[in-house]
Image (spheres, rainbow, N blue to C red):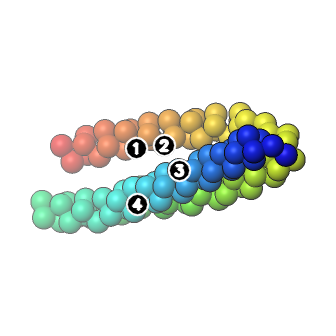
Amino acid sequence: MTENSNSNRASDHLANERTFLAWVRTGAAIVVFGFAIGRFSIAMRQLTALQGHAVKSAGISVIMGSLTIIAGVALVVAGLVRYRRTRAQLNAGTFEPAGFVVDLITILTVLLGLALAGYLIYTEKILG
């Protein structure tokens, strides 16, 4: 192997590691965001109680928060799977870029965002 090919190989592996760390950071941010959504339920119950209304249920923010936390954890696991697959492909010289995974994560993020926006509008109509 030449020095240039070793440099390119190292660069490819370092880029793969940086990409994996981006998956981890994003997953951790989504977990924290899910926790905040879940805490929103507690704030809503306290606000409702302060206004003198009966609190019937915790609402769906606990469910949405839990699902968001699970999605963040799943994203980290997906990042690990992608990292390991890419590492093996780089070592074998058969690298294939991600296709479906990127599309799936985009679709799920859009759906989660729309669901949260709908929930906020629904909550505003009930409390407003």
Disc 1 element? helix
Q: Nearer the viewer, residue 99 or 33?
A: 99
Q: Secondary structure at mark 3?
A: helix
Closer to the camera: disc 1 or disc 3? 3
Q: Are marks 1 and 3 in contact (CB under 8 Å)?
A: no
Residue on which the image places disc 1: 116
Determine crowd level at label 4: few under 14, some 14-19, many 20+ residues with C-alpha closer than 10 A: some
In the image, farthest residue toward the front? 3
Residue type of the residue flagged with mark 1: Leu
17 relative to 82 in the view: left or right: left
- Asked if the residues shown at circle 1 and circle 2 are in contact, with their CB atoms under 8 angstroms apart, the answer is yes
Residue type highlighted by circle 4: Val
Which of discs 4 and 3 lies nearer the camera? The answer is: 3
What secondary structure is found at the residue carrying circle 2?
A: helix
Left/right placement of residue 126 relative to residue 52 reads: right
The relative height of residue 91 versus residue 53 in the rendered view (above or below) is above
Where does the image place residue 35, in percent across and percent down from the top left?
39, 62
Disc on res. 32:
4
Q: Give me the residue at 24% from left, 62% from top.
A: 43
Which SS class for mark 4? Answer: helix
Q: Quick check: marks 2 and 3 in contact, CB under 8 Å?
A: no
- Residue 63 in view of the camera: no
Label 1 vs label 3: CA separation?
Answer: 24 Å
Residue bearing the label numbered 2: 112
Q: In the rendering, at what x and y percent does residue 71 appear?
A: 55, 54
- Can you see residue 46? yes
